[in-house]
Amino acid sequence: MASWFQIPKNSPFSLANIPFGIISVQSASRVPAIAIGEHALNLNAFASSGHLSVFDQPTLNAFAALGRPVHRQVREYLQNVFRADTQFPQVLKDNADLQKSALVPLSQVTNHLPMQIGDYTDFYAGLNHAYNVGVLFRGPDNALQPNYKHLPVAYHGRASSVVPSGTPLHRPSGQILANPAADPKVPTFSPCKKLDIELELACLISKPNDLGKPVSIEEAEDHIFGLVLMNDWSARDIQAWEYVPLGPFNAKNFGTTITPWVVLIDALEPFRAAGLEPGNRDSLLPYLREKRAENAYEIPLEVEITNKGGQPTLVSNSNARNLLYSFPQMVAHHTITGCNLRTGDLLGSGTISGKEAKTQGSLLEQTNGKNPIKLADGSERLFLEDGDTIILRGTAGTEGNYVGFGDCVGTILPAVSF
Amino acid sequence: MASWFQIPKNSPFSLANIPFGIISVQSASRVPAIAIGEHALNLNAFASSGHLSVFDQPTLNAFAALGRPVHRQVREYLQNVFRADTQFPQVLKDNADLQKSALVPLSQVTNHLPMQIGDYTDFYAGLNHAYNVGVLFRGPDNALQPNYKHLPVAYHGRASSVVPSGTPLHRPSGQILANPAADPKVPTFSPCKKLDIELELACLISKPNDLGKPVSIEEAEDHIFGLVLMNDWSARDIQAWEYVPLGPFNAKNFGTTITPWVVLIDALEPFRAAGLEPGNRDSLLPYLREKRAENAYEIPLEVEITNKGGQPTLVSNSNARNLLYSFPQMVAHHTITGCNLRTGDLLGSGTISGKEAKTQGSLLEQTNGKNPIKLADGSERLFLEDGDTIILRGTAGTEGNYVGFGDCVGTILPAVSF
């Protein structure tokens, strides 16, 4: 699709994308927007010219709740408005005043969380990640728990500390075991020494379901607004001590970073691909069984570490195909008990790792706390150091028609002093 | 304290209590209120007479965020208004019009969630419960995990399905192991067959803390608005299959019931008592060490089951003293990583069980799935049956001055059919 508007060929926000987000410019209020090339289109200003009227909110919740047919129609309308052969040239192409008031360079924009997130749930659907971590803890024979191939394992996460890309986070402090072999085990108080990343995708919920009303696997995708990239920061040493018997808590609650632009589920449709172990899907209980085999996405993913000095090092290449369960399966499983999902709820995929070297979505898997990664400046990393900046990227498609999430960025600040 | 207003001597809502909640009457809007004897005082109507002005909201979040000194002042003022020797007789005692417009019999009131709950966290601070359950799973020698006496174990819960007392819940369905001993383990899809209760207290957060700013143990109590009673319904068979390695998820996400009246932390001050194992507190890391020894509350608690036929059976008597960690310790631990708590966040205590027979806060502990409880009508229970109504009660103090939570009620409806 060609556009009358200048969109760089390498932009993740091509005309094929049209991701939605919440922006503010200088001290103005938060408004809905789309990203298009190197600009944001302020949808509040755009709508005030009379063409759309749901964009006077500081979050996307109201728009998302309208449901997938509306999202699809609005996205297609906006694509049409920007197309070289637009049917509506008078709306924006030939409307210099509206261009001036509604189009803002991304460099002048502050991004915010796209939605008010009610609950955040994190799944564990990255088969290779679950296997890799299982091998580290239990050896290759018992790497995966017996339930793993029957249900998408998940835990409730912390919604309050989900932050938009660019928000720096302090290294967390807490209880760690300086000497795990000692008996009795006595913890010490310390800044986390094994701070890690987790490369994930996450979906945001559009249409809610009532308490006591499960969402069927057939209907599940229509409850998904779109996807974002997510870094589920993890304090491995805090986790190792605290997590029995109820799972991770303080190891995860200090921050989770997401990209601010929601890529609509329809924008990802062209990138459907077969997921892992299609045979496994056929053996699932019926409430998790999907009709189509292409229940994953072909989205190349990467992890980059930039140290204090500013030198970037690409440390991992993965792909969204490395998930055993799809987002519709996660929705169906989450609600099978009658649990209600609300508009804006966030469901993380779990860490997305490949099988080969340099394709893992966490440092734990790459280094096992023993075999350091070498960065471009010659320094080494087992885990993150203060001042490190992590950038996750995910972009589907081909040049000129990229559908990407933009950068998911977070910098580690030193621990708070006590 | 005597009142000019008729307050039954056995009411949990004496003049010594003054709990806050959100009510509606017929189809009118939700408004803040206090419970006083068998009435609710509509604080919106009361405030409109010019005496208070923060009560025009459908939740208590705005009032709670004002902080403890304000809550204390408002509570003391309302006590004064209702006292026999009130200094302000013209406000309500001698104001028949306002009495008519603002006082509503509780029987005519619909209760709602008192606050918009951001995140819900459930702790595991009931030492006897953790021990009892540990014995069932690992035997008496390893009943408590090594971390248990060093930190208040917790997991993130599901906020969307927290409901006010009186809301019926469907029995959840999901994956269970019909034959746990089989190899390989293959789950079946079924309504939960081991549906249980958990008797808990929970606190609601008033003053928030910013991300990256831990709350010290000294300041923690001032972040607590008040307490409610809570039933953390649990599907034991779903939990047993799903919970490795990340903790309970679908076993808990289908519903959590709380009492609608928030008993302010100041109203509980007279009932401070020594908690369990005071020696343990001295050995905690400094961020969890409280100055005063009385870090628990003397609050008798009870569990009643009423079957379909309406016959009640008291199945358990416990006490809030059976907690190893206090709510301020939970707040300090939760935030030590920098995690932000928001106004309205809910922190559960974990199941509160005694050591003796008939003092446990769950059926699992009482029956171990083997030794049934006999109900008043002669029927037996290992776990809950459809149509069972569970009532939790908790009341501190003495006749005429009870400080209670009122009933925490939930009825189990049959599983949704698929």
Image (cartoon, coloured by chain):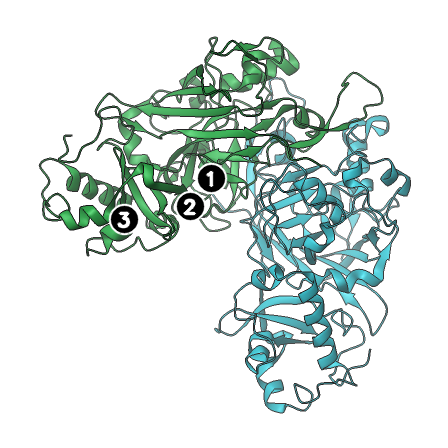
Chain colours: A cyan, B green
- Residue position marked by numbered label 2 in the rendering: B115
- Is disc 2 surrounded by few (<14), some (14 to 19) or many (20+) residues within 10 Å? many
Label 2 near label 3: C-beta < 8 Å? no
Q: Is residue A157 above or below residue B316?
A: below
The image shows residue B18 at horizontal and vertical percentages of: 27, 37
User: Which image quarter holds the C terminus of chain B?
Assistant: top right
Q: What amino acid type is highlighted by mark number 1?
A: Leu
For marks 1 and 2, give the CA distance: 9 Å
> Helix, strand or loop at disc 3?
helix
> Helix, strand or loop at disc 1?
strand
The image shows residue B403 at horizontal and vertical percentages of: 29, 28
Label 3 near label 1: C-beta < 8 Å? no
For mark 2, name the chain. B
Give the mark, 1 or 2, whose residue is nearer the N terminus: 2
* The one of A36 and B315 positioned closer to us in this rendering: B315
* The one of A46 and B415 positioned closer to us in this rendering: B415
Q: In the rendering, which numbered label is found on residue B346?
A: 1
Q: In the rendering, which numbered label is found on residue B43?
A: 3
Label 2 near label 1: C-beta < 8 Å? yes
Q: Is residue B79 left or right of residue B201?
A: left
State the count of labels.
Answer: 3
- Residue drawn at (68%, 53%), measured in percent from left and top? A223
Q: Residue furthest right?
A: A279
The image shows residue B61 at horizontal and vertical percentages of: 39, 49
Give the mark, 1 or 3, whose residue is nearer the N terminus: 3
Give the mark, 3 or 2, whose residue is nearer the N terminus: 3
The image shows residue A256 at horizontal and vertical percentages of: 62, 50
Q: Is residue A391 left or right of residue B334?
A: right
Q: What amino acid type is highlighted by mark number 2?
A: Met
